Image: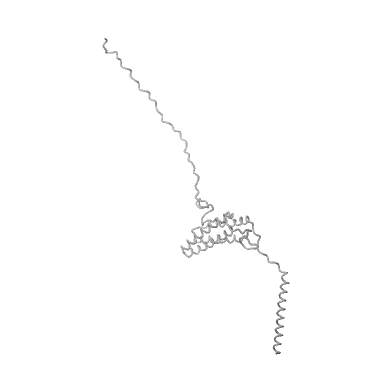
Amino acid sequence: MDMDIYMRRRLVALGGLVAFFIIFVLLVKSCGGDDEPAPIEPTVGATGEGGAVPLTVDEFIDQADAICEPANAAVGAIDPESPTAVRDEYQITADELASLQELQVDDDSRVLQQFIAAMDDLVAALRDKQRAVQSGDTAADAEAQLAVDTAEVDARELGTRYGFRECGQFLDAGEQPGGAGGEAATGTEVTPPATEVTPPATEVTPPATEATPPAETPPPADDTGGGISP
């Protein structure tokens, strides 16, 4: 009986100590919370991480085009016969996308999000093509090339709709701006204007003709000579 009373007292004392510890911890947290600064919500645009003041749409387009223009030129300068052509195009395009994603813009338009998604699809397709070329898998190479072409078409259309002048205007390896072989970048054949060739004026001189006088008519015969007079 005495043992039960002793155990009960210990339990009561232990419970009181635990309750005091909990109350003490809560008091410390409530007092220290006033000294901590409130968390800052990062400003995140359509692309990139938070932390910087987002760009306006016009500023974003200018800076994005400044990234895409040299990237397009770099791809166009690749030798298509080079064994590293696909790898180089993949690396240039991946760096281009990474630079675009570092920009922040105060715009959450769906067109811009779709453009970035199309660029991401393009990078993935170029990576698959690089692997197919390295392994010599022609079927996978053809499938990856179809994915590359599809992603480029989507990105070109979306980039134009958003207002980009350079982003999405991809060049093939060895293709110069404006199209290879004198063709426009859209792939339409340029027909030179027709020029009319005017022959030099030549004066036609008629052949000289000598006038021939009419033939002389002989005089009529004399009917009076040799006749019989009545």
Where residue 208 sits: x, y (%)?
A: 41, 29
Q: In this orientation, which residue lies closer to the viewer: 2 or 140?
A: 2
Query: In the current view of this chain or complex, which residue is farthest to the front?
Result: 1
The answer to whether residue 5 is above or below residue 226 is below
Q: In this orientation, which residue lies closer to the viewer: 176 or 48?
A: 48
Where residue 47 sits: x, y (%)?
A: 61, 61
Query: In the current view of this chain or complex, which residue is farthest to the top?
Result: 230
Q: Give the colour scheme of this rendering.
A: one colour
Q: Quadrant of the N terminus?
A: bottom right
Give the number of callouts: 0
Q: Quadrant of the C terminus?
A: top left
Where residue 100 sits: x, y (%)?
A: 59, 60
Where residue 134 sits: x, y (%)?
A: 49, 64
The answer to whether residue 142 is above or below residue 211 is below
Q: In this orientation, which residue lies closer to the viewer: 193 or 37?
A: 37
On the picture, is 80 further left or further right than 24? left
The answer to whether residue 199 is above or below residue 186 is above
